[in-house]
Amino acid sequence: MLFAVLPWGVRVPDTHEPGHATSAPERPLLWRKAAITSVIAAVLWLVAFYLIESDLIPLRITTG
């Protein structure tokens, strides 16, 4: 999920400082992206948990 969120809002500066990559973003906003990633991962986990616990997707092997 993080690799999907990392490019969001990236802006490359017009002037580059010596020693920095020309593709380095001005403000990477990593804390915001980490929070967004955590929220998306939590929602996906809750959906998977619901589907498994409600037996909509049967994953348990029953014998007998």
Image (tube, grey):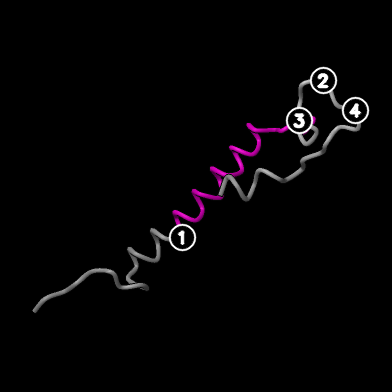
Crowd class of label 3 (few under 14; some 14 to 19; many from 20; radius 10 Å): few
Q: Which residue type does callout 2 highlight?
A: Pro
Mark 2 or mark 1, whichever is nearer to me: 2
Q: Circle 3 is placed at which residue position?
A: 21
54 or 63: nearer the viewer: 63
Q: Secondary structure at mark 3?
A: loop
Q: Circle 1 is placed at which residue position?
A: 47
Residue drawn at 63 percent across, 31 percent down: 31
Q: Earlier in the sequence, mark 3 or mark 1?
A: 3
Check whether the beta carbons of the residues at disc 2 and disc 1 lie within 8 A of each other. no
Q: Which residue type does callout 1 highlight?
A: Val
Residue extending furthest top? 18
- Residue range highlighted in magenta: 25-47
Q: CA distance from mark 3 to mark 1?
A: 40 Å
Q: Circle 2 is placed at which residue position?
A: 18
Question: Is 50 colored magenta in this rendering?
Answer: no
Check whether the beta carbons of the residues at disc 3 and disc 4 lie within 8 A of each other. no
Q: CA distance from mark 4 to mark 2?
A: 10 Å
